[in-house]
Amino acid sequence: SQQGEEDPQALSIQEGENATMNCSYKTSINNLQWYRQNSGRGLVHLILIRSNEREKHSGRLRVTLDTSKKSSSLLITASRAADTASYFCATVDSSYKLIFGSGTRLLVRP
Amino acid sequence: IAGITQAPTSQILAAGRRMTLRCTQDMRHNAMYWYRQDLGLGLRLIHYSNTAGTTGKGEVPDGYSVSRANTDDFPLTLASAVPSQTSVYFCASKQGAETGELFFGEGSRLTVL
């Protein structure tokens, strides 16, 4: 069974708007990571947040982690058409394997 | 810049045939992984290897086998392919088993008829 589940499954926004994606997971984690996948390509790592961190920033990306609620969110500010992709959260379990959720498909309309 | 190379890119295979998907990395990463990606199910871990000479089972290992004879190569074998193994397969690696981010190959699209 999958550890992380993203919400929403699909999101369509206008260029310039912010996009927020959420991830919930089931068991305790070592860290949580977000990845991006362009259509037909492999996944690319975006950001990692450790279990003792609450918020992290990288450029236009902001990730939060709430271990009490077992949830994380990824915010992309000032979205661009090039941000159109699928976004996945991955939790790192006690044996350090990464378990992925089913992803959020983001469409940014020009 | 190579990173992770997967072959073949795409393959159509008759049910019952044996197939090996190849994965090679040039980053000297210790840990390597095989995932399959199916629509609506995200990525599911098939097998992994924390270091050369060791392998482990992931979420969906049945029907698949792996070997890790050296650091660079991590082939995935389907001994007798079935249509439910139609999927896109991704190989990934990271520096150490315990830390860091995954680096992915571009995937191998397999269709079993």
Image: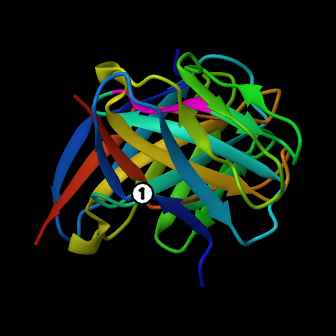
Whether residue B68 is visible to the viewer of this picture, yes or no, is: yes
Q: Quadrant of the N terminus of chain B?
A: bottom right
Residue A9 place in picture, x, y as percent: 27, 34
Q: Which residues are magenta?
A: B41-46
Place residue B47 in its image quadrant. Answer: top right
Q: What colour scheme does the image use? A: rainbow
Residue type (three-letter) at the residue carrying disc 1: Pro
Q: What is the total number of numbered labels drawn onto the structure image?
A: 1
Residue B100 place in picture, x, y as percent: 77, 55
Q: Residue furthest front?
A: B17
In the foreground, B100 or B54: B54
Q: Residue furthest bottom?
A: B1
> Mostly what secondary structure, the magenta segment?
strand
Place residue B110 in its image quadrant. Answer: top left
Residue A69 place in picture, x, y as percent: 60, 22
In the foreground, A56 or B24: B24
> Which chain hosts label 1?
B
Residue A34 place in picture, x, y as percent: 54, 50
Residue B47, compared with residue B27, is above or below; it is above
The residue wearing badge 1 is B8
In the foreground, B8 or B61: B8
In the foreground, A22 or B106: B106
Q: Residue furthest left?
A: A110
Look at 87% across and 48% down and name the residue there: B52
Q: Quadrant of the C terminus of chain B?
A: top left
Whether residue A73 is visible to the viewer of this picture, yes or no, is: no
Left or right: where A50 falls relative to A70: right
Query: In what element is the residue under mark 1?
Result: loop
Look at 74% across and 56% down and name the residue there: B94
Let me know if residue B53 is in the magenta part: no
